[in-house]
Amino acid sequence: MFRLELMVLLTLALVGCGEPVDLVLPSSAEIEAHYLYEGSLGAEVKGNVAVVTVGQSARQLRRGGTLWAKVGPYIFLFSEETQQLLNDYPNLAAVRVITMVGESEVANVLLGRDALSDIQWRRALNIAGRARVNGTRRVTLLQDLVRWGEDHAEEYNYNPRYTRSK
């Protein structure tokens, strides 16, 4: 009986001797510092999810319609900044990006930490990068990004006020 108790005690001691896990979550300022954006950008942590709120121009939505309403969050979500944020804070479970026009939410997308493999991250960065650089000239690049996002995000919601067909 003594041997069994000793084995259990040793096993528990060894399990507790692993590398310490950094359970720190980023502050709002640290999240905001990860993103370079000239427009309105705010951040907060809700539970273990980083929530990034980005202002989108009403003019842009009038010009680009439903597609621009949908693509907004994916431009930020599939970025080196988001990937780095998840790498820097291992206890962060997900990143949510919300796009707003004034006080009105346009779109809301959640990407879980494990939603993308390394290869999928490279693909996502490529798709988003091409959309950022050439999306205004080649609308299909924006469509590709929305499709990729909807296929890989844990959840996405679009405000029907901005995304319904006319």
Image (tube, rainbow, N blue to C red):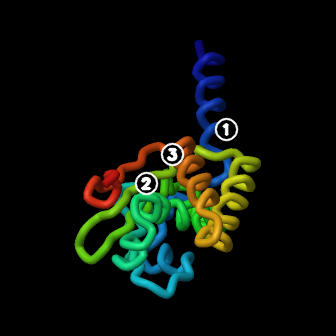
In the displayed structure image, the side of residue 54 where residue 71 appears, left or right: right
Q: Which mark is residue 109?
A: 2
Asked whether residue 85 appears in the rendered view, the answer is yes
| Precedes in sequence: disc 2 or disc 3 | 2
Task: Using the image, determine if residue 154 lies above or below residue 165.
Answer: above
Q: Residue at x 64, y 62 (%)?
A: 128
| Residue 49 image offset from top left, x and y in percent | 42, 57
Circle 3: is it few (<14), some (14-19), or many (20+) Cα within 10 Å? some
Q: Which of 110 and 46 is in front in this view?
A: 110
In the displayed structure image, the side of residue 64 where residue 58 appears, left or right: left
CA–CA distance in space, label 1 to label 2: 40 Å
Q: Which residue is drawn at 64% across and 65% down?
A: 138
Give SS at disc 2.
Answer: strand
In the displayed structure image, the side of residue 2 where residue 101 appears, left or right: left
| Residue 101 image offset from top left, x and y in percent | 31, 73
Q: Nearer the viewer, residue 20 or 26?
A: 26
Which amino acid, mark 1? Answer: Leu
| Precedes in sequence: disc 1 or disc 2 | 1
Q: Tell me whether the residue at label 1 lies in contact with that at label 2, contact meaning CB atoms closer than 8 angstroms.
A: no
| Precedes in sequence: disc 1 or disc 3 | 1
Q: Tell me whether the residue at label 2 lies in contact with that at label 3, contact meaning CB atoms closer than 8 angstroms.
A: no
Residue position for label 1? 14
